[in-house]
Image (cartoon, rainbow, N blue to C red):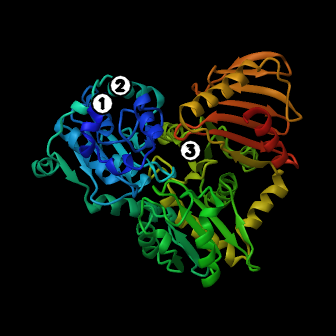
Amino acid sequence: MKQEWLNKLDESLVKSFYQQQTETQIEEGFNHILSFGTAGIRSTFGIGPGRLNAFTIRKVALGLAKYLKNNCITPKVVIYFDTRHLSKAFCNEMAAVLASNDIQTIISDTYKSTPELSFAVRHLHASAGIMITASHNPKNYNGIKVYNHEGGQLLPDDSEILSTYINNIDNPLDIMKGDFEELVRQGTIEYSNKDVTESYKQAVKKLVDKIEHNNEKVVLTSLHGTSLPLLSEILNELEYTNYVIEKEQSIPDGDFPSVTSANPEEIEAFDKGKALAQQVGAKLVIATDPDADRLGFIEIDDDQNCHYFNGNEIGLILMKLRFQDLIVEDSDLYIIKSIVTSEMAQRLAQSLDVKVNNVLTGFKYISDLLSQKEETSEKLLLAFEESHGYLAQSISRDKDAIQMVPLIIKYKNLLAQNGLTFKEILNDIYDNIGHFKDRTLAPVFEGQEGNAKIENIMQQFRQDTNEMTTICGLNIRQIEDYEKGCLIDKESDTEFQLELPKTNLIRFVFEEGFIALRPSGTEPKIKLYFSLNVENIDEISQNFVTTFIE
């Protein structure tokens, strides 16, 4: 089998990556087969069925074609791509396979953001959407996210069905596709027109309404991704021009040369933005990740102190300020949050008399609930996850940094008019609600050995469920095992069924808050979430890692 793949190395699109790999890395490409999961596919480049290359991309495309033709009368697909290596080439490969199977395919002629793709699916009444991206993963990754007709990522049941179609394709090396340029001439592949982008921009501007003040200077950085120039166009049209772009860091480049990690969850990603802010006197630095679904920001006070806000803290700030923005409207407000989002969000919502909707981790669940609520009189206050993904309005049905950045700038300027800062808003929330501190850790376990290690950690916790009464000195009140679908109440020694769908996540609930853990669906990591009203959260989180993970 290996030789058959190597015979087609020139056609694989990944020859240059293959030539830089070690023998071990090459062999790993033949030791397993890429599986389409609930978050699509993300992997590194290479040869073989276990790596991303032209042939594994074609396999996903053909599986999707079969899936759509069995579920739609006249299927239509929109494909967008980001600034990563091979994103455009992978887009064209998928388009050629889909179009060769009589599926109308709409693509972009330049890079686009994930929220634009989500918007385009609904705007163009498409059957499905594809985003070629690996979000904030390292530069040697890329991936495929598949969206349903409502612009949300596929839910697990649909992902499983699609996965079956993909897995039933025996040999990706034999997949036939037509000539890309000829399919464009025939009209089976067409390019998305400017109307889609303009409609998206209009929707964002309508959400923001207007940025009333222009007094606070802001630094923007796309971390070599897709948010610019779209964001600057929107801000200019909103007549806000008091921003500066970190130019070196905003050049589209799949190598992400100016950062160790192109992830606004990492404070190091803000180094260049902070330096520029101090040069130009800016009070806020906002960064978006490569496909512009996530964002982060730091605030600089009058004494030049930089305040970094984690994903939970940004969510709390946005909840409070959105509430003040919408409270004049006569409507029932609600939030949607994941079950690993800070305990503070629950407490703040209750204090504001805002309804809380908890969903599993993954924005697809938020999207699904938004669809269900379309016919109700309730109004969305904020949908968010602790991993820096936010939505103020369902313009798109995925995390949307493009719509959130102008809102954040609007709120920053409004606060400045009253001599206030984001930091002071957050402190006010803590003073009134209490202070549940949040930490998210993500130990990395690479390769097949790493996968086995992560699986063993989860199994060990499940085996020890009945015996465990404390963790790191905290008394366990409840254990929620979402894979088993059960809740164990330690105080009453009873077991209940959980209402949410099954997923590989365990949550330990204490009087002081919760600790949760789950394997990442997109990276070789186990995600650990701590939300505790304690003084020594760093000590507890590190003790947990030392005792149970390492």
Q: Quadrant of residue 513?
A: top right
Residue 385 place in picture, x, y as percent: 61, 46
Label 1 – label 3 distance at C-alpha: 38 Å
Q: Amino acid at mark 3?
A: Glu
| Residue 410 in view here | no
User: Going from the N terminus, do you reach mark 1 or mark 3 first?
Assistant: 1
**Left or right relative to 520: residue 344:** right
Residue 312 place in picture, x, y as percent: 68, 51
> Which residue is situated farthest in the bottom direction here?
280
Q: Are marks 1 and 2 in contact (CB under 8 Å)?
A: yes
Q: Which residue is mark 3?
A: 378
Q: Which residue is mark 2?
A: 167
Label 1 – label 2 distance at C-alpha: 8 Å
Q: Amino acid at mark 1?
A: Gly
Residue 401 place in picture, x, y as percent: 51, 58
- Secondary structure beneath label 3: loop
Residue 374 place in picture, x, y as percent: 47, 42
- Which of 152 and 516 lies nearest the eye of the viewer? 516
User: Going from the N terminus, do you reach mark 1 or mark 2 first?
Assistant: 1
Instruction: Point out the image quarter for the C terminus.
Output: top right
Q: Which residue is mark 1?
A: 63
**Residue at left offset 24%, top offset 44%:** 11
Label 2 – label 3 distance at C-alpha: 41 Å
Q: Quadrant of residue 113?
A: bottom left
User: Going from the N terminus, do you reach mark 2 or mark 3 first?
Assistant: 2
